[in-house]
């Protein structure tokens, strides 16, 4: 029996393969992002001591630890993001692990593949700093260097962790109430630096406590008088850790004075900063290696340029002296430190050139002008790391990974941009499908023709076609290229023009907004190419955009944010600002035909109001029963084309769908009772149409839901402590019909108009058929594919956060009319129904992301394409993923397997054959006319 | 010295020189043997075979008989066609489509060629009686057509159910439109 069911299921699932092998990596794209890399936690490092090539390690601003291949920018491995961006990453020399501290979690990762070697959690505190003890001191293992962690925000103190196991070797607790700042180590001592704030206001003193690396006991403590300058941690520039020059540097608020202390001594050297221009920020760059020269670079950023000074530390005399200066350059730039043996080199990266100087003298060892890249146009480097190859006192090669101001993380190899990663997209929180203005103009023209009488419409059309003739020469010119490209299967780079002239409608723009206020347009049809990218703050100076929400109109998008006084309107194709007059509201329905009702959630109630303007008096209100809290509501999408208003049964009768555009599904939870309920409302009248109650639900987990056509679905997590028979995750699907009887249109009968405000009694409720399925994984978000006319069967697209995947479940599998407890009859089989099986296993073929690991997806949006068979899918969040799906197969377009060359050759061969055969046939016909019959 | 060869056996002599006339024996000819006729015999036979011309009444009766045969002929094909239709099933295949096509074509062509078909039987004496025959002919052809329609219906090609007219049924228009406030 079970085998039968499995076979039936398999037979049903067979035509639901989501992706063909030759389509993978061509129709889809994936940006495996880390987020903005943090400056102090980004470095080149060999994954193991004998490795020839090094990897680029970083911890990003959202706490993701990752390794990038510097050759092509591909992600080698990454961790799950941390709870906050408070992350540190260190690697010991010639170690095969990197150690990260994100929040309270300290973990050692295998440097080459990202496997966790060990991890430790600090209870009730957060790791403030992390260092590796490079020096051998007898109590560490031979091959694993120990880590020193500074913990704060709870119990302050320093811990030494075993490099092999992560076990805590000793703990030093600081009970003085100081604010911990950093740890630093020298061969004999561990220095713990904290900010000591006096009781009576003013600045803070810097307190340096030296600890024994063996026992963790306090050896000594002294304070540096820095009250005048240091108020917060931001005033401290640098606290050298693990460097040859363990220095502590700070500056005052006005950036006038630079004070440097060699840790372990009490002397403070004071230097005046350049006074030619007011300095906006000072950054101190020092080498990280212990055995390198004790030289460091101080970078000064002004409003218009940047300069630097190089200082040398004399450890014997404990003095700091300025060695030389690097001249002020106009424009923004940054510096990176690199070491080869003991030599220290500084790489200066600007948007125009890369130059390398040695720390000992100011002679430029190498200089490369950068070839411009469109991805980095107009952006300047913010921070970077570099690797330099120096031969015979001249730099032969340099590669530097720099974060640019437009959020691109790029690797500059000598003079070219080797790769760039759009890390700014990592925090995408809103995205919409752009509507291009040209489509609008054509639609408008057609509409105009529709309203005119026949003759003037004809004249209008002829005029339009004549006007279109001006594009003919260009079109003809382009034709050979297009034919050639189509035959050879090559697709060239896309521009806005190509998106407009796209035959299949696969090239659709997605406008995505990030939490940092960047807005960018991606072409989903050409591997997610970034068409434009802008910073929204340039249009709204003074505001800090943190949670923008987008809405698409024809030709532009509307950006709303809590910090903006009025919405911004951005052109979809260029990224320029559009005046708000053009942005008239395009959505509003025809008010002469339909009465507009709007509803919103307020004070725990869903309230409906007459008209678009906010009025005080609601026309209806839905208050959930006491104890229940509305968690979300899902409305039918505004654009939801329905091809057929009924479902044809196997015996050719019709079950009529309950198609009401005003349906809204309200999900409520009861915290105490572990219950979740769904209420189906008619949002025009507020009438309750259907309700379902689920008990034993883990209400702390998300309950995603979606609505399409005449069916809705939602997913629940069953409570593990409940005593119900089943545990795990459930997917509930409900379908609405006008009547339970076939060929019956229910109480409304054949009337073409309907109003729910004046209902025909209770009987106008839909007939609801529901089925629930057990699913193997939790769903965090669900949506439904959209096609142009809704003829193609739909697919439920669900996001599975635990396996980092996106799955398209065919509609036939979750049809609530599947026969329960018996095999499907012949008529049901002809409808495509198979016997109900309580468990839906996600077929590997349903996974849209195939080999990609799509992490941190927040939302998935779908759109129609130019072809009825195909729907475009775009997923965003931490990663960006885009693909297209054809739930009923690509029935209206030739597949990749179609050999166009062969077809053309066949046609040509037939033509040649005809040329040869035609004279023969002609001669035979003439002969047959002239021969005398015997 | 050579001996005289023995005389040939009798059967060889009989074979080489068959008797010219049939020996008067009482033995009957073997079955299937036809003796060649003599001239006299032939003359007698030809004299006997001169046929008497049938009368017009006899001719009419004969023609009516033939006409009835023509009229009933489609009905005779009916059972075979019905079995063929049943065997091909209700799926749309090239064979069943061909068969259904002929089922429709034959009766219609037959009805159109009605006068032509019965023209050889048309005499002043039969013309009044032929009307009945023609009606029966049409009826049997209609039966054939009926079989075709039954088959088409079984194949689901006749728009007899609600689902066939579903595309002409319109979605209800709603006099209200409700949207979430954040869509505006």
Image: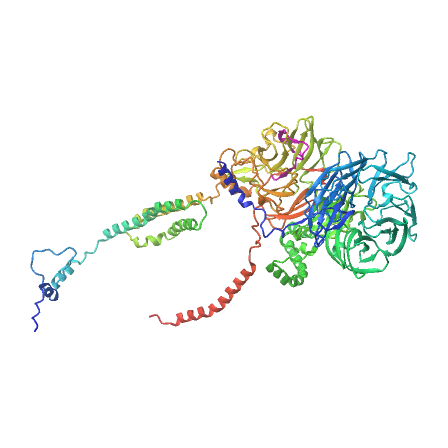
Q: Is residue A554 visible?
A: no
Q: Is residue A737 above or below residue A20?
A: above
Q: Is residue A693 magenta?
A: yes
Q: Residue furthest front?
A: A138
Q: Is residue A808 magenta?
A: no
The residue positioned 70% from the left and 37% from the top of the image is B180
Taking depth in this image into account, of A53 and B58 the one nearest to the observer is A53
Q: Residue furthest bottom?
A: B1
Image coordinates of residue A263 in percent, x first then y, are 87, 44
Q: Is residue A887 left or right of residue A513?
A: left
Image coordinates of residue B163 in percent, x first then y, are 52, 41
Q: Which residues are magenta?
A: A681-709
Q: Is residue A310 left or right of residue A557?
A: right
Taking depth in this image into account, of B162 and B107 the one nearest to the observer is B162
Taking depth in this image into account, of A220 and A586 the one nearest to the observer is A220
Image coordinates of residue A489 in percent, x first then y, are 61, 58
Which colouring convention does the figure follow? rainbow
Is the C terminus of chain A in the top left, top right, bottom left or bottom right quadrant?
A: bottom left
Q: How many marks?
A: 0
Q: Is residue A549 above or below residue A421?
A: above
Q: Is residue A886 above or below residue B182?
A: below
Q: Is residue A49 visible?
A: yes
Image coordinates of residue A613 in percent, x first then y, are 75, 37
């Amino acid at each position: 029996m079970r085998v039968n069911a499995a076979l039936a299921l398999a037979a049903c699932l067979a035509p639901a393969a989501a992706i063909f092998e030759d389509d993978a990596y061509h129709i889809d794209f994936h940006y495996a992002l880390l987020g903005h890399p943090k400056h102090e936690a980004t470095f080149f490092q060999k994954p193991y001591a004998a490795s020839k090539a090094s990897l680029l390690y970083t911890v990003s601003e959202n706490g993701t630890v990752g390794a990038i291949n510097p050759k092509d920018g591909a992600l080698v491995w990454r961790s799950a993001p941390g709870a906050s961006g408070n992350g540190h990453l260190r690697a010991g020399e010639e170690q095969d692990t990197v150690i990260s501290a994100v929040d309270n979690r300290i973990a050692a990762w295998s440097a080459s593949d990202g496997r966790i070697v060990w991890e430790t959690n600090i209870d009730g505190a957060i790791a403030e700093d992390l260092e590796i003890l490079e020096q051998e001191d007898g109590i560490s293992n031979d091959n694993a260097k120990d880590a020193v962690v500074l913990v704060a925000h709870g119990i302050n103190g320093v811990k030494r962790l075993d490099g092999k196991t992560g076990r805590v070797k000793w703990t030093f607790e600081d009970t003085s109430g100081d604010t911990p700042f950093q740890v630093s180590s020298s061969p004999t001592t561990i220095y713990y630096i904290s900010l000591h704030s006096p009781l009576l206001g003013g600045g803070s003193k810097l307190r340096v406590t030296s600890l024994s690396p063996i026992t963790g006991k306090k050896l000594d403590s002294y304070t540096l008088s820095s009250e005048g300058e240091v108020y917060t941690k931001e005033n401290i520039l640098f606290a050298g850790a693990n460097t040859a020059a363990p220095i502590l540097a700070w500056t005052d608020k006005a950036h006038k004075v630079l004070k440097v202390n060699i840790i372990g001594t009490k002397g403070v050297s004071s230097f005046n900063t350049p006074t030619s221009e007011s300095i906006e920020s000072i950054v101190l760059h020092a080498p990280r290696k212990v055995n390198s020269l004790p030289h460091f670079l101080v970078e000064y950023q002004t409003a218009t340029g940047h300069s630097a000074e190089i200082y040398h530390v004399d450890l014997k005399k404990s003095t700091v002296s300025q060695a030389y200066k690097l001249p002020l350059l106009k424009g923004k730039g940054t510096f990176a430190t690199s070491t080869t043996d003991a030599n220290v080199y500084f790489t200066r990266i600007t948007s125009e050139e890369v130059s390398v100087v040695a720390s000992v003298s100011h002679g430029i060892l190498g200089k490369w002008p950068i070839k411009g890249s469109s991805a980095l146009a107009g952006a300047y480097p913010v921070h970077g790391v570099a690797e330099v190859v120096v031969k015979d006192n001249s730099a032969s090669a340099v590669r530097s990974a720099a974060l640019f101001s437009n959020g691109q993380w790029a690797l500059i190899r000598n003079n070219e941009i080797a790769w760039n990663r759009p890390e700014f997209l990592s925090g995408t929180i809103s995205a919409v499908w752009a509507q291009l203005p040209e489509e609008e103009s054509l639609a408008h023209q057609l509409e105009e023709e529709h309203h005119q009488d026949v003759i003037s419409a004809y004249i209008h059309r002829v005029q339009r076609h004549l006007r279109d003739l001006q594009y003919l020469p260009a079109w003809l010119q382009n034709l050979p290229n297009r034919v050639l490209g189509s035959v050879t299967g090559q697709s060239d780079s896309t521009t806005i023009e190509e998106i407009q002239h796209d035959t299949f409608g696969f090239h659709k723009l997605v406008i995505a907004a990030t939490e940092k206020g960047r807005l960018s347009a991606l072409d989903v049809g050409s591997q997610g190419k970034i068409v434009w990218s802008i910073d929204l703050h340039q249009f709204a100076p003074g505001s800090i955009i943190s949670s923008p929400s987008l809405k698409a109109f024809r030709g532009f998008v509307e950006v709303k944010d809590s910090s903006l006084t009025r919405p911004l309107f951005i052109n979809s194709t260029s990224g320029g600002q559009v005046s708000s007059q053009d942005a008239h509201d395009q959505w509003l329905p025809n008010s002469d035909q339909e009465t507009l009702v709007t509803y919103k959630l307020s004070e725990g109630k869903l309230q409906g109001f007459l008209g678009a303007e906010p009025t005080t008096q609601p026309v209806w209100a839905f208050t959930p029963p006491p104890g229940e809290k509305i968690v979300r509501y899902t409305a039918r999408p505004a654009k939801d084309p329905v091809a057929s208003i009924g479902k044809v049964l196997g015996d050719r009768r019709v079950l009529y769908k309950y198609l009401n555009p005003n349906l809204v599904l309200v999900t409520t939870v009861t915290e105490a009772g572990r219950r979740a309920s769904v209420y189906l409302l008619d949002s025009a009248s507020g009438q309750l149409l259907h309700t379902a109650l689920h008990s034993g639900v883990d209400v702390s987990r998300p309950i995603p839901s979606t609505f399409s056509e005449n069916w809705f679905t939602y997913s629940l997590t069953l409570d593990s402590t409940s005593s119900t028979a089943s545990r795990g995750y459930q997917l509930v699907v409900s379908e609405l019909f006008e009547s339970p009887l076939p060929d019956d249109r229910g109480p409304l009968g054949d009337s073409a108009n309907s109003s729910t405000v004046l209902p025909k009694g209770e009987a106008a409720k839909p007939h609801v058929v529901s089925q629930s399925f057990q699913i193997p994984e939790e769903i965090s978000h669900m949506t439904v594919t959209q096609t142009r006319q809704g003829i193609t069967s739909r697919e439920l697209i669900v996001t599975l956060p635990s396996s980092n995947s996106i799955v398209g479940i065919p509609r036939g599998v979750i049809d609530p009319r599947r026969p329960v407890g018996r095999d499907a009859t012949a008529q049901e089989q002809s409808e495509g129904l198979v016997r109900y099986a309580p468990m839906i296993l996600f077929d590997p073929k349903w996974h849209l992301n195939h080999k990609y690991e799509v992490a941190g997806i927040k939302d998935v949006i779908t759109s129609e394409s130019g072809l009825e068979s195909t729907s475009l899918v775009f997923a965003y969040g931490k990663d960006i993923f885009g693909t297209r799906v054809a739930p009923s197969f690509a029935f209206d377009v030739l597949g990749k397997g179609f050999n166009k060359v062969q077809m053309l050759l066949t046609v040509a061969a037939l033509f040649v054959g005809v040329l040869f055969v035609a004279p023969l046939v002609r001669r035979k016909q003439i002969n047959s006319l002239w021969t005398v019959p015997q | 010295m050579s001996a005289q060869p023995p005389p040939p056996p009798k059967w060889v002599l009989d074979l080489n020189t068959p008797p010219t006339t049939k020996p008067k024996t009482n033995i009957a000819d073997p079955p299937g043997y036809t003796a060649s006729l003599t001239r006299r015999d032939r003359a007698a036979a030809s004299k006997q075979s001169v046929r008497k011309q049938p009368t017009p009444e006899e001719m009419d009766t004969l023609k009516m008989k033939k006409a009835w045969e023509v009229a009933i002929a489609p009905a005779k094909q009916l059972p075979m066609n019905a079995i063929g239709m049943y065997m091909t099933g209700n799926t749309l295949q090239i064979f069943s489509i061909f068969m259904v096509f002929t089922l429709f074509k034959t009766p219609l062509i037959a009805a159109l060629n009605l006068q032509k078909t019965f023209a050889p039987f048309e005499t002043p004496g039969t013309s009044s009686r032929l009307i009945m025959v023609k009606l029966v002919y049409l009826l049997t052809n209609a039966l054939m057509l009926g079989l075709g329609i039954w088959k088409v219906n079984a194949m689901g090609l006749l728009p007899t159910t609600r689902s066939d007219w579903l595309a002409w049924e319109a979605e209800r228009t709603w006099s209200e439109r409700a949207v979430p406030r954040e869509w505006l």
